[in-house]
Image (tube, helix red, strand yellow):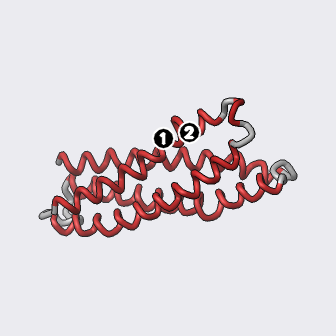
Amino acid sequence: MIVLVWLHLVAAVAWIGGMLFLSLALVPGLKEEAFAAVRGALIRSVAMRFRLVVWSAVVVLLVTGPLLLTQKVASPWDPSAWSTILKIKLALVVVLLGLTAVHDFWVGPKVARMLREGGAGKNCARAWLIQVSPWLARVGLVLALAVLYAAVQLARS
């Protein structure tokens, strides 16, 4: 059981820690003029590597989460505070996974292609997509932190 908890935590730390690093250190650091020539290529390269980390972590979380849940004595459908928090956490996870999939497999690749081809400002829809992409990542980070908060609540109740 302890190995499952450890794997679950390592996967969550890899995902959320990576999101924090990208949003608080890498992206702001690359806005310095010294990195202008390599900014796009570096962000694309890091994003592709991080996407592999994220989806590997998701697999681990989706395997270990239900296994850990079977170890819990209370039923998730029991009308207790614990089961209510669990339902909230699971709902947040579903939204987070959907948002991450949209960002990683549709918006992100489309924006990268537009920027690579130089067609970023050709129309309003493209410009809007470029503006939305980082906000999807930010909302994903907030959702991930909310999932983490719910997990702490579950562990403490």
Q: Which residue is mark 2?
A: 26
Residue extending farthest right:
122
Residue 144: percent from the left, percent from the top? 42, 49
Front-most of 9 and 43? 43
In the shown orientation, is residue 118 left or right of residue 15? right
User: Looking at the figure, which quarter contains the N terminus?
Assistant: bottom left
| The label number, if any, that marks residue 21 in the structure image | 1
Residue 34: percent from the left, percent from the top? 70, 31
Mark 1, other Cα within 10 Å: few <14 / some 14–19 / many ≥20: few
In the shown orientation, is residue 113 left or right of residue 97? right
Element assignment for label 2: helix
| The label number, if any, that marks residue 5 in the structure image | none
**Residue drawn at the location 69% of the way across and 49% of the way down:** 41
Callout count: 2
Mark 2, other Cα within 10 Å: few <14 / some 14–19 / many ≥20: some
Q: Earlier in the sequence, mark 2 or mark 1?
A: 1
Element assignment for label 1: helix
The three-letter code of the residue at mark 2 reads: Leu
Q: CA distance from mark 2 to mark 1?
A: 6 Å
**Residue drawn at the location 68% of the way across and 42% of the way down:** 39
Residue 153: percent from the left, percent from the top? 25, 46
Q: Are marks 2 and 1 in contact (CB under 8 Å)?
A: yes
Residue extending farthest left:
73
Quarter where residue 3 is shown: bottom left
Residue 18: percent from the left, percent from the top? 46, 47
The three-letter code of the residue at mark 1 reads: Phe
Front-most of 76 and 53? 53
**Residue drawn at the location 40% of the way across and 60% of the way down:** 57
